[in-house]
Amino acid sequence: MRRNFKVVDLFAGPGGLAEGFSSLRESSGKRTFDVALSVEMEPSAFRTLRLRAFTRQFEKLPKSYYRYIAGEITRDDLIADHPDEWRAAVDETVMLELGTEKARNELDPRLDHIRETAAGDVILIGGPPCQAYSLVGRARNRGIKDYDAIKDHRHFLYREYIRILGRLQPVAFVMENVKGMLSSRVAGESIFDRVLEDLRAAGGSADSYTLLPLVPARGKQAGHVIRCEDFGIPQCRHRVILLGIRSDVLSGGALDGPGRTLEPVPRVSVASVLEGMPALRSGLSRSEDTPENWRKAVISAFRIAARSSRSEGTWLKAVASALADRAKQIGVMDEIPPRSSSHLVPAKDSRLRAWLSDTRLKALPNHETRGHMETDLARYAFAAMFAEVFERSPKADEYPRDLAPAHRNWESGKFSDRFRVQSWNAPSATVTSHISKDGHYFIHPDPMQCRSLTVREAARLQTFPDNYFFEGNRTQQYVQVGNAVPPLLARQIAEVLSDILDG
């Protein structure tokens, strides 16, 4: 029988890491990893996190949960139906800003209690905020007058993770962050090297924790950069994920050699999770949003895109012709697609279908389109049709001049894929929190829908189960999805860790 471990999740977001860890069960049905505490500071993500903690109190989700995410009852109604389970979720989740004195005063006694009651069988997971490490964040910081990286507390939030690691003394930890951490430097010192040194020494001695690779080493990366598309995630998401085991556990014979690593699986594409879902139309953000106004706006957009493509010469002739044909099809369309749909369509890929689907789910949540400016619809139409013809998203210098946005960096090469289509036959680009801004990087591959991805579509690319409900407004939901660890990847990491600790 495998051991049971208590999990503490820091900087938890909506709970992607915990979802994967808590899904692992023994043949008896008992969880290998029980989430004892999750900590998040952002209110909307915290509401999502607590709701998901609530669902873990049940072996079988109650009917009232499905009614709640379908909008049939309120959150208060749900709580009233299951007060004991809700109290357990409240006890498991806490909204605090890590690194503050208030958080330390409240968390430290709880951490001590978890360590004592679990007899040391504790796992620490989570990832400090990444804005200071990401390439985009660093570029933005360089534009801030008098910006001083040494004074940016976000560079050092990982130290709170280290502090808690030292206090909790878990048998293992998993720490996730952006790939930009590898090249981030403060005062000439490598942040990544400092993080590795601090993690190894978190137990009080220089090598109290041993870092194990999750994938075979690539050059200087020592097996810490995970390419999600290699492990059945329909997304090209590359992240640094550090797995550490307490060295005394390893010296006790639990591991001989480098240990188990993640096992690659065949790549899956955008189509594997999005194809077949009901067509939705985009919204109109700056005019009256009616189906007929949408028809007129999109016909105009397709015609503008077709005319602009023809003006570029023969190389875009096929794109121009296809755009003109689709404009005619939209003109005679009997029914305009809606902006939202709760219709359930399972994923095409069998492995993803088993992970995402819930046969008791009556309505697909968080699946509503956003509004777009009419000036962007022609770019969306061109980009999606270009991808249909050439099987890739166009770069900035491939757009017709008439469709170029009034953006100072458009021709600089810095944002050559500012308008990016997700191709049916390949994994998507990295789903990031930027999807909350405008959707330009996440254009749906079907030209006829002329829109960006919905929250639910982004969540499927991130492998959140279809019954995972995101709280907050739509912008907040996008941020939550973009900042999360793909739960199915977390599940695979949990399997590797379980095998290592089981010896």
Image (spheres, rainbow, N blue to C red):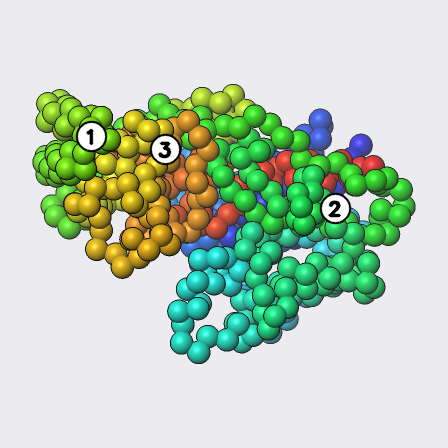
Which mark sits nearer the N-terminus, 3 or 1? 1
Q: Position of residue 276 (x, y in %)?
A: 35, 23
Q: Nearer the viewer, residue 9 or 497?
A: 497
Residue 166 seen in the figure: yes
417 displayed left or right of 28: left
Cβ atoms at labels 2 and 1 below 8 Å apart? no
Read off the residue under disc 2.
Answer: 212
Q: Which amino acid does the dot numbered 2 rest on?
A: Leu
> Residue beneath label 1, please?
314
Q: Earlier in the sequence, mark 3 or mark 2?
A: 2
User: Which amino acid type is shown beneath numbered disc 3?
Assistant: Arg
In which quadrant will I find the N terminus? Answer: top right
Q: Quadrant of the C terminus?
A: top right
User: Taking 143 as reference, is 229 above or below it?
Assistant: above
Q: Is residue 493 left or right of residue 184?
A: right
Query: Mark 3: which secondary structure?
Result: loop
